[in-house]
Image (spheres, grey):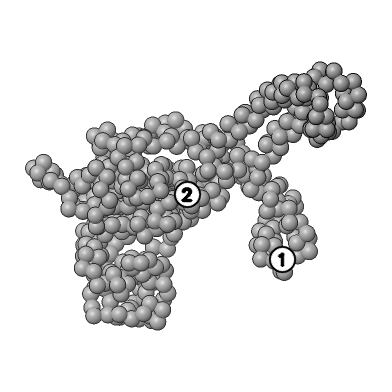
C-alpha cells in the first residue's frame, strides 16, 4: 500500500489533504470531479487484519441502510491490492472529544441544541434495528453553528428481539470503549437500546462536568467500577447543574438496564421536562471572561494579551516591551485562585506563638535572671531554646517547659485542621484547576490527564476493541 505522506490519489479520487490519523485508519478529504467526500482508509498493518476489514465493511453496510439528517452517510466500500477504504459524505466539524479536552463550559450554551439532535439520531438507529455500541465523544461531530452528526458504526450490532432475544446466549467478545462501556457488555450479554443509553449517560456526564464518572489505574479496575460502583453526582463537580440532572444521569447509568429509560423517546421526554442549569451558561462565561480580563491586564486587547503570554513563554523575543514587562507576574496569578485564601489562614497562625510567651514566665519564675532576659527579647522560640540548653543545672524548669509547649499547640491546632480539611474534601485533584467563581466548576484547561487515564497511558487500550478484555467476573 502507498505511504500516506505521498498520497495524491486514491484510485479515482484526488486527495485534497489528510484530516485525521489513528493506529487503524486515516481520514482524507478527496475530490471526484466537482464533489467532495471523505475517505476512511485503513493503515497498511490494519488492512492485513481480516476482523478490522470486516468492521469497516460493516460500517458502510449499516450506514447505507439508514438515512437521517444527523447521520453521516457512507457510499461504498472498496478493497484493492493497494487500498482498503470507505467513501463517505464530508461534514466539516470537530468531534466532541475536542470540546471535552478543551473548555466544556463553552459547550454548555449549545447543550440543549446538541441533545435535540443526538437523541433523535440515536433513536432512529434503534428503530432500524441497530445498536451503535460505541457512543462516545469521538463519534459525535458538532459544529460551531450547532449542527451534529453521529458517526462510526464499525461496532454496531443487530438488536436481538422476540424469541431471538430469549436464546441469544453470550457474546464471544466484548465490543465497546472501556470508559463508556455498559455493564451488560462486560458480561458479554447481547446489547439493546438501553446499552447505548448507558454510554450516552456517561457521555452527557462528561460534557456537563468535564470528566468521566469512572476512572481507574488499570483497565480491569475500570471495568469493575462499571459493574459495581455508583457514579458520583454531576453537581459535585459542576455546581451549576440541577438536582434533576443528577437523578437523570444516575438513572441512565443504572447497573441493571431495566432500571434505565426504556428507549430514546423516554430519554428525550425526561430531558425536555427538566431544567439543566441553575444559571445561564452564557452569563457564567461572560463573568469568567470579564474576571480573566481584569486579572490579566485591564484595557489591553485580549488578542494582544494572549500573544504576549505566548511570546513570554517562548522567551519574549516578539513580545512588546509593555507586554514583556507585565507578562512575568501573569503565569502565577492564573493557577493560584485558590492560593490567596490560604495565606490568611497561615498568617493567622503566627499570632499563636504569642501566647507561648506569657505562658513561658510561670515555669521560669524560680530563676530570676533568666526570665527577665527572656521576656525582654521579642523573638519567639529561638531565644528560649538556647536559654534552656545554656542552664544545665536547672533541671526543674526543663520538665516544666513541656507543659508550656503542650499548652501552646491547642490554639495552633484548630486553624490547621480547618484549612486543610476543606480543600481535601472539596478540591480533589481534578478541581485544582477550577477558577472558583460563582457556580463555575468546569474551566479552561481543567481536564487533567488523571481524569482520563484511558486516554493517557491507556490511549490504545481505550480504543474500540473486538478482542477479549480482562476478565472481571
Give the position of the N terminus as an image quadrant.
Answer: bottom left
SS type, badge 2? helix
Q: Nearer the viewer, residue 401 or 208?
A: 401
Label 1 near label 2: C-beta < 8 Å? no
Task: Say if 147 sits above or below 431 in the image.
Answer: below
SS type, badge 1? loop
Are there few (<14), some (14-19), or many (20+) residues within 10 Å of tag 1?
some
Q: Nearer the viewer, residue 7 or 279?
A: 7
Give the number of callouts. Answer: 2
| Residue 448 position in % (x across, y down) | 51, 50
Q: Quadrant of residue 309?
A: bottom right
Q: Nearer the viewer, residue 299 or 343?
A: 343
Which sits earlier in the primary sequence, circle 2 or circle 1?
1
Locate residue 128 relative to residue 297 in the image: left or right. left
Q: Nearer the viewer, residue 352 or 151?
A: 352
Residue farthest toward the front in the current orientation of the protein? 393
Residue at (75% x, 65% y) in the render:
320
Residue at (44% x, 50% y) in the render:
452
Mark linked to residue 332 = none
Tell me if residue 278 can be seen: yes
| Residue 69 position in % (x across, y down) | 32, 55
Residue at (38% x, 66% y) in the render:
22
Q: Quadrant of residue 245?
A: top left
Cα distance in 3D space between marks 2 and 1: 31 Å
Locate residue 24 relative to residue 48 in the image: left or right. right
Give the position of the C terminus as an image quadrant.
Answer: top left
- Provide the residue designation for mark 1: 316
Task: Say if 42 sits above or below 194 in the image.
Answer: below
- Provide the residue designation for mark 2: 450
| Residue 149 position in % (x across, y down) | 36, 56
Residue at (39% x, 63% y) in the render:
91
Tell me if residue 261 can be seen: no
Amino acid at each position: 500500500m502507498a505511504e500516506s505522506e505521498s498520497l495524491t490519489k486514491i484510485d479515482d479520487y484526488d486527495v485534497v489533504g489528510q484530516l485525521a490519523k489513528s493506529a487503524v485508519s486515516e481520514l482524507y478529504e478527496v475530490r471526484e470531479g466537482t464533489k467532495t467526500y471523505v475517505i476512511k482508509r485503513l493503515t497498511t498493518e490494519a488492512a492485513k487484519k481480516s476482523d478490522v476489514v470486516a468492521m469497516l465493511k460493516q460500517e458502510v453496510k449499516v450506514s447505507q441502510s439508514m438515512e437521517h439528517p444527523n447521520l453521516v452517510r457512507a457510499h461504498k466500500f472498496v478493497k484493492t491490492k493497494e487500498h482498503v477504504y470507505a467513501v463517505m459524505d464530508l461534514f466539516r466539524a470537530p468531534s466532541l472529544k475536542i470540546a471535552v479536552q478543551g473548555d466544556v463550559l463553552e459547550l454548555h450554551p449549545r447543550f440543549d441544541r446538541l441533545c435535540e439532535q443526538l437523541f433523535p439520531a440515536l433513536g432512529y438507529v434503534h428503530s432500524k434495528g441497530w445498536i451503535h455500541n460505541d457512543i462516545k465523544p469521538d463519534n459525535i461531530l458538532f459544529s460551531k453553528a450547532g449542527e451534529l452528526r453521529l458517526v462510526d458504526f464499525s461496532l454496531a450490532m443487530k438488536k436481538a428481539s422476540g424469541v431471538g432475544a430469549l436464546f441469544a446466549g453470550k457474546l464471544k467478545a466484548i465490543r465497546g470503549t472501556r470508559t463508556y462501556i455498559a455493564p451488560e457488555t462486560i458480561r458479554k450479554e447481547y446489547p439493546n437500546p438501553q446499552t447505548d443509553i448507558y454510554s450516552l449517560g456517561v457521555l452527557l456526564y462528561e460534557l456537563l462536568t468535564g470528566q468521566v464518572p469512572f476512572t481507574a489505574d488499570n483497565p480491569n479496575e475500570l471495568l469493575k467500577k462499571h459493574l459495581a460502583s455508583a457514579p458520583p453526582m454531576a453537581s459535585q463537580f459542576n455546581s451549576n447543574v440541577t438536582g434533576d440532572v443528577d437523578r437523570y444521569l444516575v438513572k441512565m447509568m443504572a447497573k441493571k438496564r431495566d432500571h434505565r429509560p426504556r428507549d430514546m423517546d423516554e430519554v428525550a421526554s425526561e430531558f425536555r421536562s427538566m431544567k439543566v442549569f441553575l444559571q445561564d451558561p452564557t452569563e457564567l462565561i461572560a463573568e469568567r471572561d470579564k474576571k480573566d480580563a481584569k486579572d490579566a491586564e485591564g484595557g489591553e486587547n485580549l488578542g494582544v494579551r494572549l500573544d504576549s503570554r505566548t511570546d513570554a513563554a517562548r522567551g519574549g523575543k516578539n513580545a512588546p516591551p509593555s507586554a514583556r514587562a507585565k507578562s512575568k507576574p501573569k503565569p502565577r496569578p492564573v493557577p493560584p485562585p485558590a492560593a490567596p485564601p490560604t495565606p490568611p489562614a497561615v498568617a493567622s497562625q503566627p499570632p499563636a506563638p504569642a501566647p507561648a510567651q506569657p505562658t513561658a514566665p510561670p515555669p521560669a519564675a524560680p530563676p530570676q535572671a533568666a526570665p527577665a532576659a527572656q521576656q525582654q527579647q521579642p523573638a519567639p522560640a529561638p531565644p528560649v531554646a538556647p536559654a534552656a540548653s545554656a542552664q544545665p543545672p536547672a533541671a526543674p524548669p526543663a520538665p516544666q517547659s513541656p507543659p508550656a509547649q503542650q499548652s501552646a499547640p491547642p490554639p495552633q491546632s484548630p486553624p490547621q485542621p480547618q484549612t486543610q480539611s476543606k480543600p481535601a474534601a472539596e478540591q480533589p485533584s481534578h478541581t485544582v484547576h477550577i477558577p472558583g467563581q460563582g457556580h463555575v466548576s468546569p474551566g479552561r484547561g481543567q481536564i487533567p490527564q488523571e481524569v482520563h487515564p484511558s486516554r493517557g497511558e491507556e490511549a490504545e487500550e481505550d480504543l474500540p476493541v473486538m478482542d477479549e478484555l480482562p476478565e472481571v467476573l
